[in-house]
Amino acid sequence: MGRRVIWTVFQKEMLDLFRDRKTLLGTFLVPLVIIPFVFFLLGMSYSHVEKEARAYIPIAVNGSSGLVASLQKVPGVSILQPPNQEEALQEGQLRAIITIPPALEGQIKAGGTAELHVAYDSTNQKSVYARSVIEDTVEAYSKEIVLQRLKQAGMSEQAIKPIAPTYENVASEERLSGGMLAGIIPLMLVVSLASGGIAAANDLVAGEKERGTLESLMTAPIAANHILTAKLMAVMVMSCMSALASLVSLSLVLRLGPLEMENGFSLGFFSPMTLLVLVLTILVLAATFAALELVLSTIAKSFKEGQTYMSGVIFLAMVPSYMMMPLNPVDIPGYYYVIPVFNGVALCKEVFYGRVEPLHALVGLGSSLVYVAIITVMSSRLFRREGAVVKN
């Protein structure tokens, strides 16, 4: 009987949510349209800036040296002499200013080390690129001088390179793909799970309280726990659908967008074990955020007040995601697996690195279930209070 009541209320809540255009827009429009569009714009912007930076590199050179001839051979480099070089650099008309001391060639011929001054603007990405071009040119020019000195001394280049190290990357193609995705997907998943259910949770309690429909539902011969369970399931469904939409949008960005991976793209890090852990992690995170959002929606006296409270949920989701973004699973502290949300992000990273520790999975999922139970009990007690569900 209880299951049938929960299913009936759940169907009613889902029908109401899908009739609400605002809820649908918040759940699907942002992940499916806005996120790929933002990634596309970022990729196009970086590509455009890099293309312009390579095509035209205006540089001012004060002084003379054989280095100038080497710079002029670099594609895109143009030597300019504006009247006010510092001002031109600040305004972006110049990318860099090279000052060559008069004694540079003499110091080089004497076998010494000459100083070279390069001014650039670190706030201008094109100026930063010009600095890298100058660094590469100076390094190549210096190498030519070293080879000449070695030749005059009757020595070969190997004389100053007694060791020739060989570096081997032991990371497989699957780990490379998983490592890249492990920095992006946990953030998108957790934020989507947190934000996807906000509109639904706020509408299902605070919204219905404001409209007066929740009071009518509470007067029906239905246990409050059954109503709360149905609402929790509805919010979880919306959260999971938002997360799924985010994953779809990310896959579109990776396949069709301007972003490219140097070593290709592989999903070989997925296995039945890692997929199971990922699905369970998504479900417990969705339940955690759904229960917390229902608590906040129950406390709120109006829909607008509920929106204010919900902003804290996004903050709760973003902090662990950003803190753990640069971490490899082997560097994640053990206690993170018992901290809410942190444990979910940690397990997601292990999944995409293709190495899920069974103990970490048990501790992370088990502790998450405990937190869900605690928050659900809190929500149930608040929900049964007449003042919490009746509009004042």
Image (cartoon, rainbow, N blue to C red):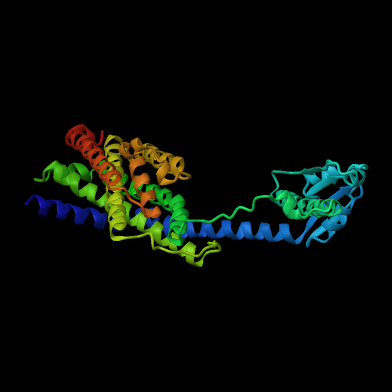
Q: Is residue 131 above or below residue 36?
A: above
Q: Position of residue 93 (x, y in %)?
A: 80, 51
Residue found at x 42% / y 51%: 188
Tell which residue pokes out farthest to the front in this image. Answer: 154
Q: Closest to the observer: 8 or 330?
A: 330
Location of the C terminus (image quadrant):
top left
Q: Position of residue 230 (x, y in %)?
A: 19, 49
Quarter of the rendering containing residue 321: top left
Tell which residue pokes out farthest to the left in this image. Answer: 1
Q: Residue 323 vs residue 105: left or right? A: left
Q: Position of residue 173 (x, y in %)?
A: 46, 61
Would residue 210 be visible to someone looking at this image? no
Q: Position of residue 153 (x, y in %)?
A: 84, 50
Tell which residue pokes out farthest to the bottom in this image. Answer: 256
Would residue 360 be visible to someone looking at this image? yes
Q: Closest to the observer: 240 or 273?
A: 273
